[in-house]
Every structure is written in structure tokens, then in C-alpha cells.
Image: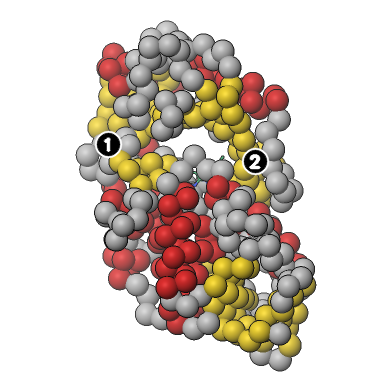
Amino acid sequence: MRSIDTVLIGGGIAGLSAAARIARHGETVVLERESAAGYHSSGRSATFCHFGIGDGLVHKLTAISKTLFAAPPEGDHPALARRMAAFFIARADEEEQLDRLTETTLAHSPQARRIPGAELRDIVPVLNIGDGGFAAGLFDPDAYKLDSDAMLQANIRALRAAGGVLVTDAPVGAIRREGARWIVDTPGESYAAKRIVNAAGAWADTIAEMASVGTLGLMPLRRTIIAFRPPEGVDVSGWPFTKTVGEGFYMLPEGSGQLLASPMDESASPPCDAQPDEETVALAAWRVEQGTTMPIRRIDHKWSGLRTFAPDHSPVAGYAPDAPGFFWLAGQGGFGLQTSPGMAMAAEALLLELEWPEALVENDVRPEMLRPDRLRITR
Ligand SMILES: Cc1cc2nc3c(=O)[nH]c(=O)nc-3n(C[C@H](O)[C@H](O)[C@H](O)COP(=O)(O)OP(=O)(O)OC[C@H]3O[C@@H](n4cnc5c(N)ncnc54)[C@H](O)[C@@H]3O)c2cc1C
């Protein structure tokens, strides 16, 4: 049995970004079931950072995180992000949604500007405009394409530099309370920790059940992405991340000259190694073909992952009201990468009862917005 201060369950972006900070304050171990960090949601994302997703809290956490994505990396390391514009497009009957999005985006990204229908194709030449097509847009030049691998590796480096450890191939199989400690069993080792951080993504409620802690009603929703080549002669390298404000799709250029696209599906799923189904893959291609002049002749690659939401769709960080030392870090939904620096700051402060960080104060992020006691806990 190894005695430590904090054990984190889950080697995705949530667990690792928090662990990198928490390890500065005491002996910290991250346990990951798979053989590599980021195998589940964190490695299957579209890795984009923008204000066209989530509620006011998500936007504030994104704004805090964005300043870090914009900063050049320290030392000889790959950048965490590169600037890529976000372009939101609306049909004639979706202008109200575009107005609302314009307001929230402008609050955090003052360079954003509306694009009239006739100019949409100056930005993405293949868009269908006019009758039944897109009628207006919002262009935010200050958005970011993230690099999930660089983000995971930067957090693992920071964790190790602070003396922390990531253990892979370490499925947590049992959790129990003994006196003032949590005992966490993996096949290779058991850990006795003062605090346990539940950052298990889609499995966070499963981990709570294992520890006999009340669950939050987390909802894993599957999302699918396809990769395809644009038609001959179409250079997509300068295209923005393009997203319909209503039902539709998003698409973005990927380094290899390919485009990635998603039909923004949200099918309820149990926690699992999510796989795409043929119907959703076909829907992705169909929606892109409907919204653009591009035929999709072949899908080169496809994958799915789970976006796990709390019932109120806001992220969760804070101690369980019904179990001392059991800390929730869950519900990162479809914004877990873009909010991870801000969420990690909040998790560190809440876990260790530190002064509330200035960046969170300045952006009006308060502890009660994140704490699990705002949700109905089921025992
Ligand atoms: C298709 C898709 C597109 C997305 N696009 C974006 C985007 O553009 N921008 C953005 O910010 N976010 C995006 N997201 C969301 C983002 O990927 C997630 O919010 C984020 O990765 C969640 O991180 P996590 O660490 O909570 O979960 P995960 O990365 O899933 O990590 C949880 C880890 O816990 C481990 N675990 C579970 N149970 C146990 C156990 N018993 N023992 C040990 N380990 C365990 C799992 O193996 C897993 O590795 C997208 C997600 C998907 C699926």
C-alpha cells in the first residue's frame, strides 16, 4: 500500500491539467486505466477553442484559458494551439441565434464581425448561399485550433517536474474509506490518499458508485467525426473552423490537407470505448454535401468519442457534499480542452482550499458555480 496526499482517477485532460498544479502541494498520483493518456474523449476531440459552445460559465473559463493558448510555449516544446478563425453560419430563419451568439462572442472576442450573406463565400468558397442556403455569418479571427497531444504532454511534463506520477494500465477496481483515508485499488498497487479526485470522464458516476458516493446523473453523449479530402484543386488550408448555428455540421481543415466534419450528433451512450455507426457517418457526409458544393467521394477516417455533461450542462469541480475528501472534476462536455487551464486553476484552489485565483475573480467565476452541491445527488 502506497501512502500519498492526492490520487486522481483519469488520465485525460481534466485529470492531468489539475494534477499538474496539485502536485506542487503534495505527493500526487494519476491513475489511468488505458495504456496511454488521452485514449478516450481527450484524444478524440475536434480540439477547437471558441465561444460558440456552452453557457456563460463555459465562456468565462474559455476566456481565461484562451490567454494561455495565445502565449508562446516555454522552452523547446510544441505550441499548445495556433490561431484559426471561427466562422458561424446561419440560414435566414436562424438570424436570432446568430444575434445571440454575436453578443456572447463580442463580449470576449471584440474583433469578431458579422458577415453578410453575399460575402460568406469570400471566406469559405464552397458554402451554399441564397435560397435555402446560408444567409449570414459571424467571423471571429481570435479563435484557436488546439493540439490535444501537446496539451496532454505539457501537463504530464509539469506533473513530473513537480514530483507527481502518472500510472497507466492502472484500472481502479475498488475504492473504500478507511479512517481519514481513501483506499484505491489497482491490479498493480493500492494507494491510501487523503483526497481522491474523480476525473474519470464518462465513468465519473461509475467511480462514485464504486466509492459508495452519491452520483450526479452525468450524461455521456456520443459525437462523431469524419475526415475526407476536399475536391481536386480546392485548397482548404486557410479555411476557418466553420459551424452552423442551427442543426447542421461543423468542419475544419486538418494539417494533411484534409477536412474534418461532424454532424454534431449527441446520442446517449453508456460509458464505453465509443465507435461510430454507419448511419451517423453517412449523416455527417450528407449534411456537409447539403450545406456546400462539395461532393464527398470517400471518407478516409472516422471516429467517435463521448462528451459527458452534468444535468445543467455546466462543468463540475468541488468536494462531494456527502463524502469527505472525495472531489468531483467532471462534466467537461464538449468544452473540456478549451476550458482545461481555467478548470485546473479552480480545481487546485477548491481541492486545497487556497485563495481563489485572480484570473477567476476577474472573470467572475465563483466556486458555487462549479460545486457539485448545485446538482441533485442520487444515492
Ligand atoms: C468528437 C468530439 C469532439 C470534441 N471537440 C471538442 C473541442 O473542439 N473543444 C473542446 O474543448 N472539447 C471538445 N470535446 C470535448 C473534450 O474532448 C472533453 O470535454 C474532454 O476530453 C474531457 O476530458 P476528461 O479528462 O474529462 O475525459 P477523458 O479524456 O475521457 O478522460 C477520462 C479518463 O478516465 C479514465 N478512467 C475511467 N475509469 C477509470 C478507472 N476505473 N480507472 C482508471 N482510469 C479510469 C479513462 O480511461 C479516461 O482516459 C470533444 C469531444 C468529442 C468526443
Q: Secondary structure at mark 2?
A: strand
Q: Quarter of the image holding residue 68?
A: bottom left
Q: Under 8 Å from ligand 1: the CB of mark 2?
A: yes
Q: Is residue 310 left or right of residue 104?
A: right
What residue sits 58% from the left and 61% below the top?
Answer: 11
Could you tell me how far apart the alpha carbons at marks 2 and 1 are, in whole angstroms? Answer: 29 Å
User: Which image quarter is the C terminus in?
Assistant: bottom right
Residue 187 x %, y %: 76, 70
Residue 189 x %, y %: 71, 76
Amino acid type, mark 1: Pro
Q: Residue furthest left?
A: 111
Q: Which numbered tag is attached to residue 222?
A: 2
What residue sits 63% from the left and 45% below the top?
Answer: 306
Q: Is the residue marked by circle 2 packed among few (<14), some (14-19), or many (20+) residues within 10 Å?
A: many
Number of numbered discs: 2
Mark before the other along the chain sequence, 2 or 1 = 1
Residue designated by label 1: 141
